[in-house]
Every structure is written in C-alpha cells, then in structure tokens.
C-alpha cells in the first residue's frame, strides 16, 4: 500500500497560510431547547495534523464533533469536511471518516467480531470480499484478536473502548475523529492509543481527538483547539500555544533569596522557587539574567527555559473566559493525579 | 502490522461520486442480528409452543381416547361446534385458531418488540451511530429496519401456523379437515388457506410494526414502544366493546382480526379480509410516514 500524499491533496479548503484543511467550520452554533451548547465556533483542522480538542466537561467538544460528523444539525453555521459541505453531502465524505463518538456502542449479545462485521457491512468503501479481512485487521490493530470471539457483554471497559477504536479504523480513512479515546483504558491501553494515533499520523491521516487528559494531548498532538463554554478560546499549533504564555527561566542556585534580591534591583521580575529562582524573561534576554547573577557572585548550577505546560496554558485560557477553572482543576485531579500541579 | 489504513490513493482533488454499501448486505446484517438476539428466539419459541400446548390440552380434555381418530361426524353442522372442540381434531382449525388467539396480543407484542429494538434499542446502546456514521442514509436505514420487522412478523406468523398444522396432523392426521360450513376440504385447499392466513397476518402485524417504528424513532427506550403498543391494543379492544362507539370501530386496527374466521368458511368470503388488510395498510402508511419524518430530523 503506497501513500501518495501529492495525489491526495485537497485544494478546496485552505486557511490563510495556504494549508489544506481536513475540517473547517464557520460560525457554528447549536442551541438545545434554549441552552447554547456551542457558539460561533470557527474550527480549522489542517490536513495531516493531529488536533487535540480540549475543554472542561460541557464545553461543547462532543456537540461540535457530532455536528462535524453530520449526526446533529447545527442551528447556524457551515461545516466543511474534506472540502465537502456537511451535513448536505455527508454521504460522500463520511466513508472516508472514521469516528468513535460518545463511547463505544455495540450489541452485548454479539461477539466483538460479529459487532464489527455488522458495522463493516455498512462501510461503503469495503467490497464484499474485504469485510472479514478488514475486521481482522482492525481487531489486530487494537489488540483484541484474542478476545474477538467473546461476547461484548463480557468485555472490560478498556476492551469495549478498544473495540470502538477498531470500528473507527475499519476502512481506509482520511480523517479519524476520536472522542475521549482513552476513557477507561489502563496505562498500557493509553500507550496503545497513542501508538495508533502516531501510526495514523505517519500515514498522513488527519486525526481529531478530544480529551480532557492534557498530558495525553501534549504527548500526541501537533495542534490544539481549546473550547470553553461552547466558544473556541484558542487554537493553533501546540508549540505556539505553549510559547504564548509568559516565558520563564528556571535558575538553580544555592542562594535563591539573594538572587531574587539582585535581580529585582535590576528591575528583572523574579521570585523564589524550590531549588532556585523563577525569572520572567519576557522583556529580559536570558543571557542577561545569568550575567547579572554571576557578576553579583551568585553561583548558577543550572539554568533552563521553562516551557509553559499545556496544563498551565489551559488553565489560563479557560480562566480568562469563565469561572470554570475550579471545575477543571477538580476534573484533572480526579483523572490524572500524577500530573504535578 | 502489515496493512494500515492510509489515505485512499484513489482520491484526488475532489471526493469520488457517492458510494453506498449494497442494501442486500445491510439487510443480511440486520436479519442476522435480529435472529441472533436471545429475546427474539425466546419469544419465537414461545409462539411455536403455544399451538402445541393448546392442541394437546384440548385433545386430552375433550377426547381422552384420542387413539381412535374421530371422523368428520362429530363436527356439528353449520359451524355450531365450539371452536376449541373442533381444534382438537383438526389440522386446519388448530393453526387458524391459534393464529387468531395470538393475534390479539402475543403476535402484536412480538412485532412491537422488534420495532422497539430496531431503532430505540439500537439508539440506547449507541450502535445506531455506527451505521449512521458509515454512513447509512436515514431513509435507507428505515427501509432496512422495516424489512427486519417484516421478517419478524412473517416468521412469527408462519411459526404459529406451522406449529398448529404439525400438531394437528400429529393429533388427528388429515381427518377433520372440515370448514365451518361443514364441507370437507382437500389438503391442498387447507394449505393455501393457511398460507393466505400467514400472509394476511403479516400485513396486519406490519400495521402494528409501522406504528411501533414510529414510536421507536422518537424514543431511546425500547420498552416504551412495547408498552405503548400494548396500551393502544388494550384501549382499542375496550373501545370495541361499546356499541355506542360503532362509528369508531372501523378505525381501530384490532377490528380486523375477527375477519380471519372467514378463512374457515366455505367458500371463503374475502370482503372482511380485504377490509382488514386495507385498514392495516393505512396504519402502515401513517406509521411509516411518522417514522420517516422523525428519523430524518432527529439528532443521532
């Protein structure tokens, strides 16, 4: 199987910088019985990117994804998927889109394999003779071959999630949309999802993955969209987003208190940190900070640029807009206690 | 890890013209799913058992010495014999009688269950999304689901009649194949009447099934579909008891069931059967329209 990216390029939808877009929305809005779930969402998913969609619970991630996939009719706004309007021409584009939305949905009395065969029967891109092979391949990719003949009822939460992932990978895809793909997975399973996303990325498949596990997104994504209360509060390349916070330099020194004093005398913002000082280098070049310290006779053991963690950026972004940071922090604590705060 | 899903190399520039999964493939998947469902199998087994139980029970009570097959003599002239007594001896009346009895409640509920599982049940497990995303257009989805319900209606009716026929043949052989009018019927004559009964019952049940699908498209709870159909049937049957509401009776679906008796007469009078079928078709059209309207506008 060859991947000829040149032939695949879609010229229809392009953003300002000329990159082809796998998905784009304009002024997307959805109102459920008077409640605004999503409002004015202008989403841009570049071709070939791995886009992480972040947001607290109820921020409109799933609603946006459901509208992208034509499951829900938007109240207002336009959607283009692979250059085709959705839901108008959804039947043309959806065969090329794999999706796991709102958790896996399967029949408990059928085996994992039978469940996938049922879905494969509806895949327009699979010819009749390919169904069995496609199902076997998908099961193998998610590591369910051994459990393929067991009833779905007997699956663990993680196995159910994997089967959902397998259904998104049944046919050759150009865009894969995964809504909370690591829900219920153990660390090994999470690792595997990461591997699958990386494989898809390497094959030129665009991936849109929603998650509230920030470490997960930071590890796998090239781009990020942050939603809060139904509004996009930030989107772009992951690196840009991480750089957008105030840059700091972390200096390890045995004499932190005096270092802070010296720097403040030079009007360089600094504060005490464990094992040293944290210096704001938004206006001062790092070299000058070191120079100042060394000239004052303060020993510098180590100095490194501190990249804003995604978690910090996320908290900042969602805090600016609403009062949800408390909720987010609680949620993150519950989901990922190992993240240092 | 040899084959990985990659960007489809056949695509260039614009997406290819629409491609759809063949409907036969969808139908096969749907039928397989329906008849793999434990619930369906249990209910069908029950439906098949009831004519056997009825036949044996009546045979034992009415004619303890069943070893001597009774001739046509004991059947009262002019259809005066009670239907349950006749049943015991006839491979003709037992299947028809069973069908009529079960059409009052059991068979409609079976079909309502199938209709409830078809959309509401699939929606509640989330499995419906899999097909919607494949994608299966919603109109096609309704066609596939309706054919599934039709299959259940047909199989259930055929099972009841076949089970009654076999029980009748075992208990009484080919004796007692007598119409209510007292004329003897040939085996071929009996068979076409029974086949007609199956077809008619299927049409009647599809009237119920279409309404079930309409409710099914509006909810996520399959039990709600069964309960609604049960409620509708009970209310209809209560209303049928009031002669003051005569004007209403032609609009009630269960009015049709009694016309199946006409198949026991000789010659068969088709007026009531035709009217019943038309009534069921009206329910079918209304139910399907509502189901289509609901399914195509609802959020998946």
Image (cartoon, helix red, strand yellow):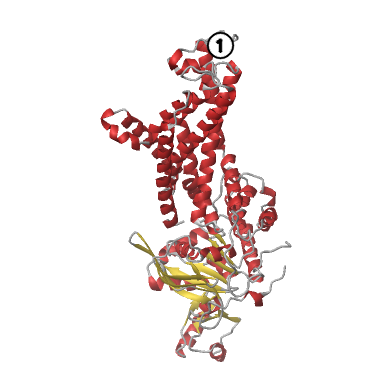
Residue visible at 49% across and 28% down in the picture: B99
Q: Is residue B263 above or below residue A225?
A: above
Using residue B135 as the reference point, say whether residue B76 is left or right of it. left
Q: Is residue A257 visible?
A: yes
Residue visible at 46% across and 47% down in the picture: B120
Residue A324 in which image quadrant: bottom left
Image spot of residue B66 (x, y percent): 57, 10
Image spot of residue B42 (x, y percent): 55, 33
Residue B229 vs residue A276, the one in the foreground: B229
Chain letter of the residue beneath label 1 in the structure image: B
Q: Is residue A250 above or below residue A77?
A: below
Secondary structure type for disc 1: loop
Q: Is residue A212 above or below residue B182?
A: below
Kindly give the residue lying farthest to the right in the view shown. Answer: B2
Residue visible at 53% across and 67% down in the picture: A214
Image spot of residue A267 (x, y percent): 45, 89
Image spot of residue A231 (x, y percent): 41, 70
Residue B191 vs residue A295, the one in the foreground: B191
Location of the N terminus of chain A (image quadrant)? bottom right
Question: For mark 1, what is the residue?
Answer: B71
How many numbered circles does the render carry? 1
Residue B39 in which image quadrant: top right
Using residue B150 as the reference point, say whether residue A204 is left or right of it. right
């Amino acid at each position: 199987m060859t991947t000829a990216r040149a032939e695949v390029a879609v010229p229809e939808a392009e953003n300002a910088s000329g990159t082809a877009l796998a998905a784009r929305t304009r002024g997307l809005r959805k109102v459920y019985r008077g409640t605004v779930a999503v409002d004015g969402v202008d989403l841009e998913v570049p071709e070939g990117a791995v886009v992480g969609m972040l947001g607290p619970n109820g921020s409109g991630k799933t609603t946006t994804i459901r509208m992208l996939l034509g499951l829900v009719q938007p109240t207002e706004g336009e959607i283009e998927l692979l250059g085709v309007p959705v839901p108008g021409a959804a039947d043309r584009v959806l065969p090329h889109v794999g999706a796991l939305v709102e958790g896996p949905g399967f029949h408990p009395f059928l085996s994992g394999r039978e469940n996938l065969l049922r879905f494969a029967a509806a895949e327009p891109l699979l010819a009749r003779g390919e169904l069995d092979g496609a199902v076997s391949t998908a099961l193998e990719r998610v590591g369910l071959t051994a459990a393929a003949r067991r009833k779905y009822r007997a699956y663990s939460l993680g196995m159910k999630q994997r089967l959902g992932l397998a259904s998104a990978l049944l046919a050759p895809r150009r865009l894969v949309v995964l809504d909370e793909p690591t829900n219920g997975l153990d660390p090994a399973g999470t690792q595997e999802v990461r591997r699958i996303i990386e494989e898809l990325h390497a094959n030129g498949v665009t991936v849109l993955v929603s998650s509230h596990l920030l470490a997960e997104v930071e590890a796998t994504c090239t781009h990020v969209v942050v939603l809060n209360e139904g509004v996009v509060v930030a989107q772009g390349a992951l690196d840009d987003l991480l750089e957008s916070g105030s840059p700091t330099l972390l200096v390890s020194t045995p004499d932190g208190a005096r270092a802070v004093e010296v720097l403040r005398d030079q009007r360089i913002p600094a504060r005490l940190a464990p094992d040293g000082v944290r210096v704001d280098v938004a206006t001062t070049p790092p070299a000058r900070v070191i120079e100042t310290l060394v000239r004052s006779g303060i020993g510098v053991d180590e100095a490194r640029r501190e990249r804003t963690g995604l978690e910090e950026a996320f908290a900042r972004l969602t805090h600016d807009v609403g009062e949800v940071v408390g909720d987010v922090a609680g949620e993150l604590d519950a989901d990922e206690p190992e993240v240092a705060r | 890890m040899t084959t990985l899903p990659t960007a489809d190399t056949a695509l260039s520039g614009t997406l290819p013209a629409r491609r759809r999964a063949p409907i036969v493939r969808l139908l096969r998947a749907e039928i397989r799913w329906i008849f793999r469902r434990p619930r369906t199998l249990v209910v069908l087994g029950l439906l098949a058992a009831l004519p056997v139980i009825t036949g044996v029970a009546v045979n034992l009570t009415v004619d303890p010495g069943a070893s001597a097959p009774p001739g046509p003599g004991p059947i009262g002239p002019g259809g005066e014999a009670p239907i349950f007594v006749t049943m015991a001896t006839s491979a003709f009346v037992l299947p028809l009688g069973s069908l009529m009895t079960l059409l009052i409640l059991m068979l409609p509920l079976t079909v309502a269950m199938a209709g409830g599982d078809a959309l509401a049940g699939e929606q509640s497990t989330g499995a419906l999304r899999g097909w919607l995303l494949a994608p299966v257009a919603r109109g096609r989805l309704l066609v596939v689901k309706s054919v599934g319900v039709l299959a259940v209606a047909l199989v259930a009716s055929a099972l009841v009649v076949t089970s009654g026929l076999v029980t009748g043949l075992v208990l009484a052989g080919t004796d007692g194949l007598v119409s209510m009018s007292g004329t003897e019927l040939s085996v071929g004559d009996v068979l076409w009447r029974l086949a007609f009964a199956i077809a008619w019952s299927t049409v009647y049940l599809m009237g119920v099934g279409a309404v079930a699908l309409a409710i099914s498209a509006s909810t996520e709870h399959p039990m709600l579909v069964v309960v609604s159909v049960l409620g509708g049937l009970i209310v209809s049957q209560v209303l049928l008891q009031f002669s003051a509401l005569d004007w209403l009776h032609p609009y009630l679906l269960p009015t049709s069931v009694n016309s199946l008796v006409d198949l026991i007469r000789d010659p068969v009078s088709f007026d009531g059967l035709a009217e019943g079928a038309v009534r069921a078709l009206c329910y079918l059209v209304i139910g399907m329209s509502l189901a289509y309207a609901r399914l195509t506008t609802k959020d998946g």
